Structures are given as C-alpha cells and as structure tokens.
Image: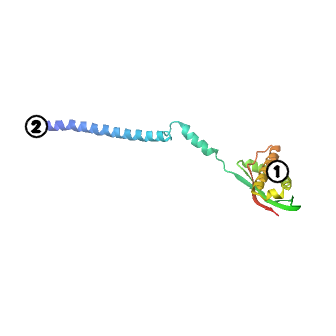
Amino acid sequence: MAENSTAEAVPAKKGKLKLIILLTVVVILAVALSVGGTLWFIGGGLPGMGDDAGSEGEVAEESFTPSVYLAIEKALVTTVQGEGRQRYVQAYVAFGATDPQALTAAKLHLPLIRSQLVMQLSNSSFTELQTPEGRQGLADNMLATVNQVLEQEGEPAVNQVLFRNFVVQ
C-alpha cells in the first residue's frame, strides 16, 4: 500500500506543478495586458510601436528656439518738437531674434541701422513718446525699419526691438 500512495503522489505533484506554472503565466500575461492597455488609453501608445505619438512630442520640443539678443551700447539721441520747443530723446535699444544670423547681420550693418533709427526717432512727436502706446508704436516702426535695412542687404529679419532705457525731456 505504501507503494501505491507514492505512485499516486507523483502524478498529483506533476499536476500541481503544471497548475502553478499555468497560473503564473496567466497572471504575468494579465499584468502585461493591463499595463499595455493603460498606456494605450492614456494616449502615450505602446513603447516601440507607432512612432507618431513620439515624433509629435519631439517636433514640439525641437520647434522651440530661444531668443538671442544684441544690445546696442551707444544710445540713440536726437531732438523732437514738442510743446513749442525742442525736446531731447535718448533711447538705448536691443534687438531680439531667434536666428543668431540675424543679429550678426544687424551688427554688421549697425551704422546704417543706427542712422535710420535716429531719423525715425526724430520724426516722432514728444506727446506720443510720453505714452506707453506711443513708445510701443515707435518700437514697432523701428522693427519695420531694421528689417527693411536687413532685407535690402539680403539678411534674415530680427523679431523684436526692445527699449533698455528710454528718456524724454
């Protein structure tokens, strides 16, 4: 009888071992499917599949280009007509661009650009320059002037003209 119970125990152990392995495989498969389904529904997609979602994120990161600046060290100084007498305007400006080549070109053509900006500044009215809107309009006009000079020279455009300091008296 002892032999008979041992013979029955071996097949029972083999059956239990198969059952444990099968349950382990099922649990691992369920966990993998759960993680994969979660990634899929969140919108991240599955790693290594469908580079569409990954490439959109990379394009968004690559499309951001930080601005670089060129400060003009010498002030633009001129007179403007205001309230029946001559007034003085002093403006320190800087150029901003996302393309460093534009600032290199602006530095190269700075004498021409300064001349045009002084002319633009001297054509402004004292009353306009005292308001924030008037100064913003001047900055916009200066940007157009700088870009016109750069365009004539076949160079890329700058994005901004910024006032570092602005005095009217």
Q: Position of residue 92 (x, y in %)?
A: 78, 59
Residue 151 picture location, percent across and down:
80, 44
Q: Tell me the quarter of the picture where residue 132 sits.
A: bottom right
In the rendered view of the protein, which quadrant contains the C terminus?
bottom right
Q: CA distance from mark 2 to mark 1?
A: 108 Å
Mark 1 lies on a secondary structure that is loop
Label 2 neighbour load within 10 Å: few <14, some 14-19, many 20+ = few
Outermost residue to the right: 85
Residue 169, labelled with which disc? Answer: none
Question: Which quarter of the rendered picture does the N terminus lie within?
Answer: top left
Q: Residues within 10 Å of mark 1 (few under 14, many from 20)?
A: some
Where's residue 61, x and y in %? Answer: 60, 45
Earlier sequence position, callout 2 versus callout 1? 2
Identify the residue under disc 1.
109
**Residue 48 left/right relative to 66:** left
Taking depth in this image into account, of 134 and 83 the one nearest to the observer is 83
| Amino acid identity at mark 1 | His
In the rendered structure, the answer to whether residue 122 lies left or right of residue 97 reads right
Task: Answer yes or no: is residue 74 visible.
Answer: no
Amino acid of disc 2: Met
Residue placed under numbered mark 2 in the picture: 1
User: At numbered mark 2, what does the secondary structure look like: helix, strand or loop?
Assistant: loop
Q: Residue at x 83, y 51 (%)?
A: 113
